[in-house]
Image (cartoon, rainbow, N blue to C red):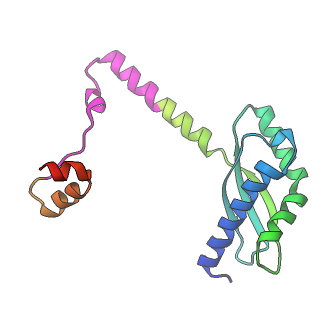
Amino acid sequence: MTNPRTRAKIEARIRERLAYCIEFELNDPRASFITITSVQISSDLSIAKVFYSVYGTDGEKSKAMHMLEDATGFIRKQVGRVLKTRRIPQLRWIYDDSVEVQEEVERAISSALQHDRDVNPEAHAELGKIEPEEKTGDVMDQGFLDSLKPRDEEEDE
């Protein structure tokens, strides 16, 4: 129903306002370390799914969830002040665990690499020496690389 570009602008505006409201306007100690990761609004602009993450223990995550649910009315009112729409969307809070999943994957990869290095000390030796490959035959690539040089180096040449 709504233009995708308009929806994207509204989502961005909601995200900015939510982050500001949580950081500066809520006088609740449970509001610490909350990050609004994204907002998805329905096509009829009636429901906004707000994805958030919390840095801390499971208890702090639970407290933050309850705080957000308790403050939904106030936050929605604050969002309504900056939106130029007929309706203020209902806010649905959804915990985003993508950061935790990413940390687990990175830990698994590093432990696998360390295990490989313990078995064979020469394994993955090239990972420490990753350097960009330069293509000298292509004029366009060389021009691009030259444009990345600082001005001082170009004057010296």
Question: Along the horizontal axis of the image, is 120 left or right of 23?
Answer: left
Does residue 96 appear in this view?
A: yes
Question: Along the horizontal axis of the image, is 47 left or right of 152?
Answer: right
Residue at point 91% right, 51% down? 70
Q: Is residue 128 above or below residue 141?
A: above
Question: Along the horizontal axis of the image, is 23 left or right of 3?
Answer: right
Q: What stretch of residues is rendered in magenta?
A: 109-135
Percent across and percent down for residue 14 are 72, 65
User: Is residue 132 found inside the magenta-colored segment of the image?
Assistant: yes
Q: Quadrant of the N terminus?
A: bottom right
Q: Is residue 114 above or below residue 50?
A: above
State the residue in front, 157 or 60: 157
Percent across and percent down for residue 124 are 29, 28
User: Is residue 129 found inside the magenta-colored segment of the image?
Assistant: yes
State the residue in front, 151 or 47: 151
Residue at point 69% right, 67% down? 13
State the residue in front, 69 or 107: 69
State the residue in front, 76 or 157: 157
Residue at point 82% right, 39% down? 62
Percent across and percent down for residue 28 are 87, 43
Percent across and percent down for residue 67 are 86, 46
Answer with the quarter of the image where residue 17 lies.
bottom right
Answer with the quarter of the image where residue 60 lies.
top right
